Amino acid sequence: MATGQRTVLQFAPSSTSAAKVQPLVIFNICDCYVRRPDQAERVIGTLLGSVLLDGTVDIRNSYVVPHNEFSDQVALDIEYHQTMLKSHLKVNPQEVIVGWFSTGLGVTGGSALIHEFYSREVSNPVHLTVDTGFKNGEVDILKTAMVDKLPGDLDGMEVLTERLVALINDVYKYVDDVVEGRVAPDNNIGRFLSDTVASLPKLSPPAVDKLINDNLQDQLLMLYLSSITRTQLSLAEKLNTAAQII
């Protein structure tokens, strides 16, 4: 089954009729393709996610599996695959294997062997192929959203604060117009504003500053921990690949 012009989803006959791919998966596959060994023509790997109640396969994560490919024969690093699977399950135990991916347009002679392997891992695996050569067109999302740098937590907080100030000014103007008789009062809006004000906790300015600073520190800590986790996984991947070469 084809979705769009750049990504192909292929299924064996079953009740599964649809799949959705999170953007992180596509970017991860492209990154693995860029960092592939010089002699490798394509990269393959495992897809993780879950099957929703309506039968849709939700693909949320992925990791590359080292392999050697020649003619119609494929040799997968099964030990590396199992190690990476255990590592991912420790972080996201709710995710399971839902299929596999490969780069390039369409399938090759060795794809049937790989699909057979993943069929032993999970019934009816999804095969996702990503056109890294852009033979079916260009990936617009990669070129239209160009920015000098990624926004940080402070930038996001600044945008939210500006938006909050703008909303407060709108409310202030509306209330002032109603009091001065320039706008007819609306009881529904009045009750909504009253409930909103009543729901706000009574905090002093120092308490609000402390609350914001504590929240910011928690976010920075999470970013630090996630960075350490990514570094550890990347290091484990490189060490396992080097061990296979040795």
Image (cartoon, helix red, strand yellow):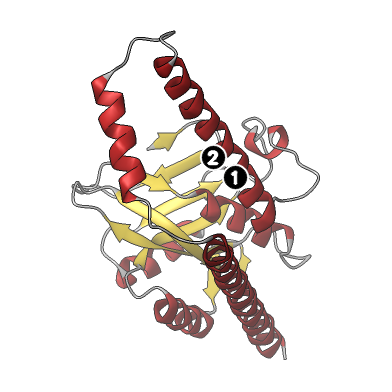
Residue shown at 60% from the left, 67% from the top: 213
Q: What element carries label 1?
A: helix
Residue 72, position in %: x, y?
Answer: 54, 61
**Residue 227, picture quadrant:** bottom right
Q: Is residue 22 left or right of residue 37?
A: left
Q: How crowded is mark 2: few (under 14 residues within 10 Å), some or many (20 or more)?
A: few
Residue 73, position in %: x, y?
Answer: 54, 67
Using the image, tell me which numbered label, if any, was put on residue 119: none
**Residue 241, picture quadrant:** bottom right
Q: Inspect this view and state whether residue 82 appears.
A: yes
Q: Which of 6 and 104 is in front in this view?
A: 6
* Three-letter code, disc 1: Thr
* Contact (Cβ within 8 Å) of mark 1 with mark 2: yes
Q: Nearer the viewer, residue 1 or 23?
A: 23
Q: Which of 54 and 133 is in front in this view?
A: 54
Mark 2 highlights which residue? Answer: 164
Q: In which quarter of the image is the N terminus?
A: top left
* Three-letter code, disc 2: Leu
Q: Is residue 4 left or right of residue 50?
A: right
Residue shown at 51% from the left, 40% from the top: 7
Q: Quadrant of the C terminus?
A: bottom right
**Residue 98, picture quadrant:** bottom left
Residue shown at 51% from the left, 60% from the top: 110
Residue 234, position in %: x, y?
Answer: 65, 77
Mark 1 highlights which residue? Answer: 161
Q: Can you say whether 3 is above or below 44 in the image?
A: above
Residue shown at 32% from the left, 50% from the top: 199
What's the CA distance linking mark 1 and mark 2? 5 Å
Q: Residues within 10 Å of mark 1 (few under 14, many from 20)?
A: few
Q: Which of 237 and 188 is in front in this view?
A: 188
